[in-house]
Image (spheres, grey):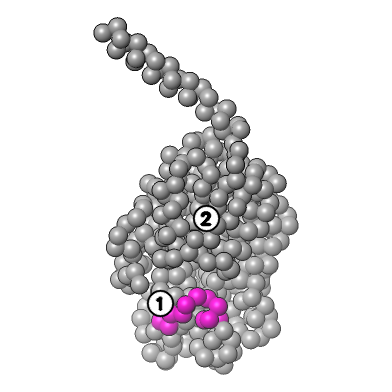
Amino acid sequence: MFQLMKVSATLAGLCTLGVLHSPTLAQNYPTQPIKLIVPFPPGGVNDAVARPFADRFNKVLGNMVIENRGGAGGTIGGTAVARAEPDGYTLLLGSGATHLVGPLITPTKTYDPVKDFRPIAILSVSGLGITTHPSLPVKTLKELLAYAKANPGALSYGSAGVGSATHLGAELFKSLINDQSIAHVPYRGGGPALADLASGQIKLAFLNVSGQLISLHKAGNIRILAVTSAARNAGAPDIETAVEAGLPGMVAINFAGLFAPAGTPDAIIARLAEAARKVMADAELRDLYDKAGLEVSGEDTPAKAAKFIDEEIARWSPVIRAINLKAQ
């Protein structure tokens, strides 16, 4: 009995010691490079967010190394982080692909987007551009709606691929205008879709707002009729939002955020969130994001980021179910 009490006391002492020293460990964090997994190949909007962020993070808290781990619509990288040691040294640049679409449409669930991660901060958001080729006889969103109504079945739209934010945004658009006759033409990425739109191979596309998209719009090669963000894009403030253009509810955004594995200590999450806020306040970084069509998010605390994710999952789950989206 005495021996059992002695062991219990020892265990209690070790637990207390661990609790006492956890703040100290967090204060010393990081002592090694932090790996930020970008769950897509190099290039594109994810790298446009991650690399400038990592460059500035290195000056604020510690060495951050980008690892591109693409595949399965972002879920391979998401799974790697969900299963990583929760010590703050493996983080995920999460997005709608990893936290909305992938987990909802993949038959074999490799992770839960809420239970298996701790949100740190949403770094950026970006809307979609409802975009046309100049040969389509419309110059405003209202004119597009009138054209679609007068010519049922005549329109099709290009997207960055099945299950992409551009695909979901377009399907939301179709449901809001009550027109399912607009056919989907999925591409293998936004780049090929934009190339075909600019050449006139397709007349309508839903594409991520980017510096390239805005440049082509300004040059007259394409027309961005409206953006689907809640507010006008800082890189093209003359383009109205879809809501302003008369389509209530047409809000669809991409997001990019920092996520850690579930079980990562509060103190480390707090340090990472504080560092992220400092990085995102950098004027040069904000200018780079503006030029890339990205907006700095205000969801810059773990609590705000968690609420944001919950709301996005609740908003898009019905859309995904309605179109019976399946993994490709």
Dividing the picture into quadrants, the one containing residue 290 is: bottom right
Give the image location of residue 94, x and y in percent. 49, 56
Q: Position of residue 108 (x, y in %)?
A: 30, 60
Instruction: Give the label, 1 or 2, closer to the camera.
Output: 2
Q: In front: 186, or 124? A: 186
* Residue 191 shown in magenta: yes
Three-letter code for the amino acid on which mark 2 is drawn? Ile
Q: Position of residue 243 (x, y in %)?
A: 52, 69
Q: Which residue is mark 1?
A: 174
For the C terminus, give its image quadrant: bottom left
Q: Which residue is mark 2?
A: 37
Q: Earlier in the sequence, mark 1 or mark 2?
A: 2
| Callout 1 amino acid | Lys
Are the residues tagged 1 and 2 within 8 Å (C-beta)? no
237 lies left or right of 181: right
Residue density around tag 1, few if under 14, some if 14–19, many if 20 or more, within 10 Å: some
SS for dot 1: helix
Which residues are the magenta region?
184-194
**10 Å crowding of disc 2: few (<14), some (14-19), many (20+):** many
- Residue at 68 percent of width and 51 percent of height: 56
